[in-house]
Amino acid sequence: CFLILFSFILAVAKTVFSPLQNIDWALFGKIALEIFGSFGVGAIFAILIALYFKFIKHEPVMFLLATAFLVTTVSKAIHLEPLLVAMTAGCIVENFTKQGEAFMSSLGKGKSIVYIVFFAINGATLDLGQLQNTWFIAVVILAVRQLSTFAGLAFGSLIADRKDRTLRRYGWTAFINQSGVTLAAAIIIEKSFPGIGNSIKSIAIAMIAITDFIGPAMFKLSLRKTVGAYKDEEHSSA
């Protein structure tokens, strides 16, 4: 859902900030074509990946790296969203074929290579001066985000009529960490909007740095409190 919404908003923003285009029904048709076209191309790649893991199975990590490069190249050539294409392919292989386990295992073996290259490039292009100017905005956005999460969980637990307050108090701590797709989306925004995009990327990186630092500890706290509370509830009901 995030990638679909992101693709839609990005396409609209490109049109709004472009003096040569106007917002009309043709724009929404173009956006729909990009989204559903990404689904279709992703399904084609999913079939190719499944066939490879069924019949060939040789050097799967190198195959996946080459496939990622091909997905990016093809998507850009026909004006589709590479992240949406890749997500669709992975979803189909994992959930609708018998090669999902081998696919995920190969992804696990090759992810360290991708992480090293991905974060090395982004670290090299990081503007520390810009980051210093945007850290306060990142803190404010994170605070609003976590307050919203807290309010949503509290409201949901009230609707569910849960008597214990553990989920209301500690449930939000499990939703602090954010990275991966957030960073990829920030990079896409930076490339799409060279001016303001750099500032948005700096804010996103500052948010990721903060959440990566405190997120794991807070997630552990959430598990300890909520799981312990549910165990006590089961023992009391038994």
Image (cartoon, helix red, strand yellow):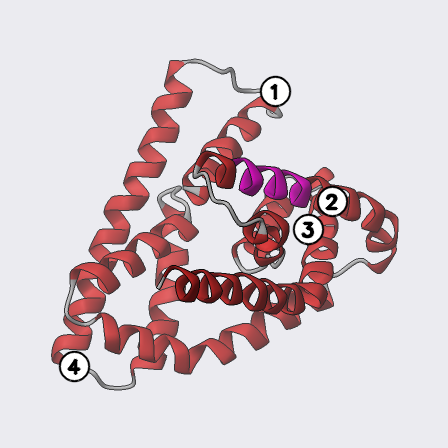
Q: Amino acid at mark 1?
A: Pro
- Distance in Å between CA atoms under marks 1 and 3: 27 Å
Most distant residue in the bottom direction: 58
Report helix, strand or loop for mark 3.
helix
Mark seen at residue 19: 1
Q: Which residues are magenta?
A: 145-155
Q: Camera-side residue: 114 or 233?
A: 233
Report helix, strand or loop for mark 2.
helix
In the picture shown, does residue 221 fall above or below 195?
below
Which tag, 1 or 3, sits closer to the chain's start?
Answer: 1
Please give the count of numbered marks on the rendered protein. Answer: 4
Mark seen at residue 204: 3
Q: Are marks 1 and 4 in contact (CB under 8 Å)?
A: no
Q: Are marks 1 and 3 in contact (CB under 8 Å)?
A: no
In the picture shown, does residue 119 fall above or below 89?
below
Q: Amino acid at mark 3?
A: Ala
Report helix, strand or loop for mark 1.
loop
Instruction: Please identify, in this view, whether the residue under mark 1 or under mark 4 is nearer the observer.
Output: 4
Q: Main secondary structure of the magenta part?
A: helix
- Distance in Å between CA atoms under marks 1 and 4: 50 Å
- Distance in Å between CA atoms under marks 2 and 4: 49 Å
| Residue drawn at point x = 29 percent, y = 81 percent | 60
Q: Amino acid at mark 2?
A: Ala
Across and down, in percent, residue 185 comes to 56, 49
Mark seen at residue 210: none
Across and down, in percent, residue 20 comes to 56, 20
Confirm whether the magenta stretch covers residue 152: yes
Mark seen at residue 143: 2
Across and down, in percent, residue 203 comes to 74, 48
Pointer 4: what residue? Answer: 56
- Distance in Å between CA atoms under marks 3 and 4: 40 Å
